[in-house]
Amino acid sequence: MKRALIIFLVMISGLLSFGQFTKARLQATGLTCAMCSNAINKALQARSFIQSVHADIKNSAFDIVFKDNADVDIDEIRKAVEDAGFAIGNLKLTGSFRNVKVENDKHVQIGNKHFHFVDISSQVLEGEKTITVVDKDFLTSKQFKKYSASTKLKCMGSGKVAGDCSGVAAGTRMYHVTI
């Protein structure tokens, strides 16, 4: 009986949803020179889940590659940039997805993180896809205002699950994203 159950679980595992972030493109604000870029580069490289960082000085951007199967900490990326004395103007995460159903103004768990998708059409994420983090402190205040107007759920303002977020424990970190 145990063997049959194990075989069954292995067979259906291919049908389960899966998502793993592999890389990111970060645009920083406030950079004025190559030394600024170097400060961010070093701060990002110090994070254990980051494999490599390539600075695009002309565009104040950084291409980040994550270590295979790493638990990517999105808030640590923001903290690294802020600790270097700068801010994030835009953060796009690219990942490999299998059967991840997303709907507008709904929550989805990807890996061990919770995401609230805003301003999107319903779809199933398959293959390599890029999502944009639209939380406060991950984009300009003007852009944040636009995206926060697209939801009535309170978690958008705080980044924490509120009482109106179903299925996720109150106080859990919720990342707000769009495609």
Image (cartoon, rainbow, N blue to C red):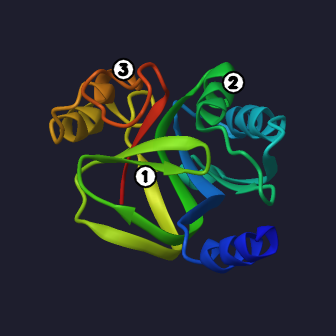
Q: Which mark is residue 158?
A: 3
Identify residue type, mark 1: Thr
Residue 173 vs 134, above or below: the answer is above
Residue 86 vs 77, above or below: the answer is above
Task: Classify mark 3: residues with Cα within 10 Å, few (<14), some (14-19) or many (20+).
Answer: some
What's the residue at 27%, 39% (across, down)? 143
Quickly name the residue at label 1: 132
Q: Which mark is residue 84?
A: 2
Residue 66 lies in quadrant:
bottom right
Residue 94 vs 157, above or below: the answer is below
Q: CA distance from mark 1 to mark 3?
A: 18 Å
Q: Disc 1 or 3, which lies upstream in sequence?
A: 1
Q: Is disc 2 placed on a helix, strand or loop?
A: loop
Identify residue type, mark 2: Ala
| Of marks 1 and 3, the one in the foreground | 3
What's the residue at 44%, 33% (across, down)? 174
| Of marks 3 and 2, the one in the foreground | 3
Q: Is disc 3 placed on a helix, strand or loop?
A: helix
* Residues at marks 3 and 2 touching, judged by CB atoms closer than 8 Å: no
Could you tell whether 19 is left or right of 104 in the image? right
